[in-house]
Amino acid sequence: MDEKSKPWRLLNERIVACESCPRLVAWREEVARVRRRAYQDFEYWGKPVPGLGDQQACVLVVGLAPGAHGANRTGRMFTGDGSGDFLFPALFEAGFANQPDAFQRGDGLELSNLFISAVCRCVPPKNKPTRQEMDNCLPYLGEEMALLPALKVIVALGRIAFDNTLRLLRQQGYSLPRFEFSHGAVYSLGDGLPTMIVSYHPSRQNTQTGLLTEAMFADIWEKVKENLADDA
């Protein structure tokens, strides 16, 4: 095992084996057992989903949780559902991904200078984790952030990701002012902390209603690149 990747390997093993939230354990396994009709022949992952991407990344993307028939099925963040179908083409266009498509593990997807994580690693019923479930899972996000020494930008996808990433930093002892959730907002969190860029979540509900358009999302990644260039 490569010494640089060993901490990641050990962390991901702990994430995948986690059973801290009985409600989520039961739900993720039920979804994997019952399956959606379109995926009856697909072997569901049905476990907590670890982070995905470049372990030397300067950019961290934080989402909410695995999709029931997306990451809970494929075992890879944002892979196999409508949110990923919107996210990965944008990352490809911005130069953070080597391909615009993400169907399943082993499909050749590679991320460059970007790592994808989430507030919760298990699919929650109705996409609504409880406060305790988020509390149980947030330390994993904190450990990932600590393993990204070059981290310069956090992209929060949605209000839950925004609120809980800030809550995590406050739990770590950082004194942060109150920030408003606003799509496209860019916040300096303070000395020694990354810049936070805020986006609506690329859920089908948001993209199909026009709340989040391709142009609006592309602008988020342009802001990311501008911030990286300013720090270069």
Image (cartoon, rainbow, N blue to C red):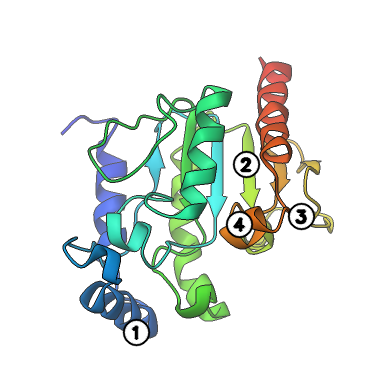
Spatial distance from mark 3 to mark 4, Cα to Cα? 9 Å
Q: Which residue is mark 3?
A: 175
Dot 2 or dot 4: first in sequence order is 2
Spatial CA distance of label 2 from label 3 is 17 Å
Mark 2 vs 1: CB contact within 8 A:
no
As helix, strand or loop, the secondary structure at mark 2 comes to strand
- The reply to whether residue 193 is visible in this rendering is no
Residue 5 located left or right of residue 190? left
**Quadrant in the picture for residue 49:** bottom left
Say the numbered circle drawn on residue 172: 4
Percent x, y of residue 77: 40, 50
Three-letter amino acid code at the position of disc 2: Ile
* Inter-mark Cα distance, 1 to 4: 26 Å
Label 2 environment density (alpha carbons within 10 Å; few <14, some 14–19, many ≥20): many
Find disc 1 in the rendering and name its residue. 22
Q: Is residue 155 above or below residue 3?
A: below
Question: Tag 1: residue type?
Answer: Pro
- Image marks 2 and 3: residues in contact by CB distance under 8 Å: no
Callout 1: SS: helix
- Mark toward the start of the polypeptide (1 vs 4): 1
Q: Is residue 61 left or right of residue 196?
A: left
Q: Earlier in the sequence, mark 1 or mark 3?
A: 1
Q: Amino acid at mark 3?
A: Ser
Whether pointer 1 and pointer 3 mark residues with C-beta atoms closer than 8 Å, the reply is: no
Quarter of the image where the N terminus is located: top left
Q: CA distance from mark 1 to mark 3?
A: 33 Å
Mark in front: 2 vs 3: 2
Q: Amino acid at mark 4?
A: Gln
Query: Contact, CB < 8 Å: mark 2 with mark 4?
Result: no
Instruction: Read off the residue under disc 2.
Output: 154
* Figure disc tally: 4
Disc number lying in front (1 or 3): 1
